[in-house]
Image: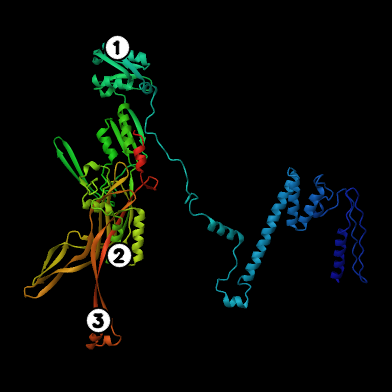
């Protein structure tokens, strides 16, 4: 019965709280007392008194606090409200497009800027939330929490909840991060750091280049120096205590450089003119403490040629103590990985050691720099030395081909080479070296009464087999098309001028040439065995080329020292068998000494060619013997009587080895370089 009374009471309270709101200027109406209808004889409940009116405004929900009659912007109020209405309807793309259009129409309006920024941010968040919801929906559909029968049958992955978005973003950032510097693999172009070797000349050094004329007779040297200083404007300071200043001179010179005249005077009277930035003073040449020395630094452009070797492998130091002092001698052992006979001391260092008279100098090989201290005249000599030696070293490209071909192909090739010869008994030789003229050759009178230089057939053959690039290409093409040639090797290497180089391709084997006896004795027996002694000897099977190229002074000719070698059929064969016989006369130990057996084809020669020409060497013959067996099927394989149905044929095929070597001078930038004789002849002499 209590419940039936309380429920209507609560409803009345809720109803009283939901009375219509009035404007803030009006007073709240008085609420009528609530009456409760109850069944017969209910318990008596006092009515709820109405709340007394107050001056406080009525309670308004939070959503209704925004005033709808606010004007956002006088010019674009309706458009702004339209954008807000679209945003309220969650139509962010339309709101974003409309806000962007408004901002484009009036970009300086701060209200439109704020609206556009807010709409962009909310639109981006809406898209991200929609994408995240879609991803979660797909992940939830494909996860193990929502399996299907095909997924249960075909799923092989571990089932689990998808990672959160922040975790996935962190993993993506880690995977996309660069593990190498941004500058890796990039090419940067910058100007070459050039350094001027010549030191800047001061005012006094420039004035010494003036030409002067002097005519004096029996005048003291002090007076001569004073007159030269006054006439040329050069500040000369001299110590009158120098005894050489009292000497008398007689000079008659016209238009000579003042610096050369002062050097001549100083050389004859043992004093030196020290040239400074602002003055020139005279000092005693014998007193080194009075000499003015400078320290200069020179940066080389081309660097040094040093031995290609590793660090010292062994150091043997010997110390000898004597009454005069302690002498320490040291022997170092190096392993070279390029045996090109490069000197331990570069040519520039040797030249500085022999010709520079300064007090100190040092070379930094890592930075290609020279540091020197001396007088300006001594440093001038050093500058000339550096200029001469700091030049690019010429290089030669060596292209070689080792080709074997059959006898018919060799004869055909020889016929092609001989086709270009003139049908005459004596031919005019060509001077490939540039060192001899026609007058140095003996002359022969031909039947036509013309005098022509004579040349031996040996020298003719040497230069006849020099081919150009086009002739070489035609020759190689003819050999390949014949089908009876085989290229053994085609090495290419670039060599420095006057530096030997080696290139080899083949199999390497080792063998011992020395052995020693090792004995071990027991109580009832003695055993001796042969043990290899010393270092093994290396033998290589395959093609090898040793070459040295020397470029002539005019740059047109190359002197080649060639040593091609081909080793084939290398194998170790038994040379001797040593047997140790015991005391009972039985053989207890046997040892077989093996030495190599191989076929070698080697040529050593020197030849002069022009840049880009090819020298052909060859004629070394090798016989290839093969045995061919022809038999009647089935019958030829029957024992004993099968020999009647077989035929053996021994074929002896001679093969010739030809070696083509092309030498081409390379420019500093890598192009093929061939000097033109006309440009060398017509160029003015320096």
**Image quadrant assignment for residue 125:** bottom right
- 2 or 1: tag closer to the N-terminus: 1
Residue that badge 3 annotates: 647
Across and down, in percent, residue 419 comes to: 30, 58
Horizontal placement of 208 versus 315: left or right? right
Q: Nearer the viewer, mark 2 or mark 1?
A: 2
Question: In this picture, is 310 found above or below 236?
Answer: below
- The local secondary structure at tag 2 comes to helix
In the picture of the structure, the residue carrying the numbered disc 1 is 223
Q: CA distance from mark 3 to mark 2?
A: 29 Å
| Image x and y of residue 122, in percent | 71, 54
- Identify the image quadrant of the C terminus: top left
Nearer the observer, disc 3 or disc 2? 2
Q: Which mark is residue 409?
A: 2
Say whether residue 356 is visible.
yes
Q: Between disc 3 and disc 2, whose residue precedes?
A: 2
């Amino acid at each position: 019965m209590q419940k039936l009374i309380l429920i209507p009471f609560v409803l009345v309270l809720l109803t009283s709280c939901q009375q219509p709101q009035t404007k803030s200027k009006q007073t709240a109406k008085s609420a009528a007392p609530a009456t409760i209808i109850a069944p017969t004889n209910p318990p008596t409940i006092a009515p709820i008194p109405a709340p007394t009116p107050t001056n406080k405004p009525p309670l308004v929900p939070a959503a209704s606090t925004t005033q709808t009659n606010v004007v956002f912007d006088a010019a674009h109020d309706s458009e702004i409200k339209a954008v807000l209405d679209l945003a309220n309807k969650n139509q962010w793309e339309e709101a974003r497009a409309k806000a962007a259009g408004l901002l484009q129409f009036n970009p300086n309006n701060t209200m439109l800027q704020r609206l556009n920024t807010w709409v962009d941010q909310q639109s981006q968040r809406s898209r991200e939330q929609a994408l995240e919801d879609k991803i979660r929906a797909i992940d939830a559909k494909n996860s193990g929490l929502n399996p299907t029968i095909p997924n249960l049958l075909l799923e092989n992955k571990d089932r689990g909840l998808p990672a959160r978005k922040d975790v996935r973003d962190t993993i993506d950032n880690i995977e996309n991060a660069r593990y190498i510097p941004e500058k890796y693999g990039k090419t940067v172009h910058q100007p070459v750091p050039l350094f001027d070797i010549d030191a800047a000349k001061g005012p006094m050094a420039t004035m010494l280049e003036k030409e002067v004329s002097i005519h004096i007779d029996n005048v003291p040297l002090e007076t001569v120096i004073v007159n030269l200083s006054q006439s040329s404007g050069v500040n000369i300071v001299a110590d009158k205590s120098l005894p050489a200043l009292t000497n008398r001179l007689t000079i008659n010179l016209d238009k000579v450089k003042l610096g050369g005249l002062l050097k001549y005077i100083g050389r004859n009277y043992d004093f030196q003119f020290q040239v400074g930035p602002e003055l020139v003073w005279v000092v005693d040449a014998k007193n080194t403490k009075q000499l003015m020395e400078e320290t200069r630094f020179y940066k080389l452009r081309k660097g040094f040629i040093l031995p290609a070797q590793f660090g010292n492998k062994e150091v043997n130091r010997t110390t000898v103590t004597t009454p005069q002092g302690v002498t320490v001698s040291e022997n170092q052992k190096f392993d070279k990985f390029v045996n090109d006979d490069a000197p331990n001391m570069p040519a520039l260092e040797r030249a500085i050691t022999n010709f520079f008279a300064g007090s100190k100098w040092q070379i930094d090989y890592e930075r290609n720099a020279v540091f020197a201290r001396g007088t300006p005249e001594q440093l001038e000599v050093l500058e000339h030395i550096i200029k001469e030696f700091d030049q690019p070293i010429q290089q030669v490209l060596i292209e070689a081909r080792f080709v074997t071909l059959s006898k018919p192909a060799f004869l055909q090739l020889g016929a092609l080479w001989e086709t270009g010869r003139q049908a005459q008994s004596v031919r005019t030789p060509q001077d490939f070296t540039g060192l001899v003229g026609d007058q140095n050759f003996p002359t022969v009178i031909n039947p036509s009464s013309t005098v022509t230089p004579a040349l031996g057939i040996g020298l003719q053959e040497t230069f006849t087999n020099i081919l150009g690039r086009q002739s070489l290409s035609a020759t190689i093409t003819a050999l390949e098309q014949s089908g009876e040639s085989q290229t053994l090797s085609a090495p290419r290497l670039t060599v420095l001028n006057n530096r030997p180089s080696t290139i080899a391709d083949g199999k390497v084997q080792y063998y011992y040439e020395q052995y020693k006896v090792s004995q071990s004795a027991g109580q009832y027996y003695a055993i001796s065995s042969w043990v290899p002694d010393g270092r093994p000897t290396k033998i290589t099977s395959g093609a090898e080329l040793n070459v040295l190229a020397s470029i002539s002074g005019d740059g047109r000719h190359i002197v080649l020292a060639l040593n091609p070698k081909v080793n084939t059929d290398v194998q170790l064969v038994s040379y001797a068998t040593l047997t140790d016989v015991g005391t009972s006369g039985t053989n207890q130990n046997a040892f077989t000494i093996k030495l190599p057996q191989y076929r070698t084809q080697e040529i050593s020669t020197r030849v002069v060619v022009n840049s880009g020409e090819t020298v052909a060497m060859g004629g070394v013959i090798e016989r290839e013997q093969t045995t061919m067996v022809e038999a009647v099927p089935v019958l030829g394989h029957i024992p004993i009587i099968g020999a009647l149905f077989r035929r053996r044929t021994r074929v002896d095929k001679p093969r010739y080895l030809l070696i083509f070597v092309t030498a081409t001078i390379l420019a500093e930038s890598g192009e093929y370089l061939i000097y033109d004789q006309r440009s060398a002849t017509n160029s003015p002499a320096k």
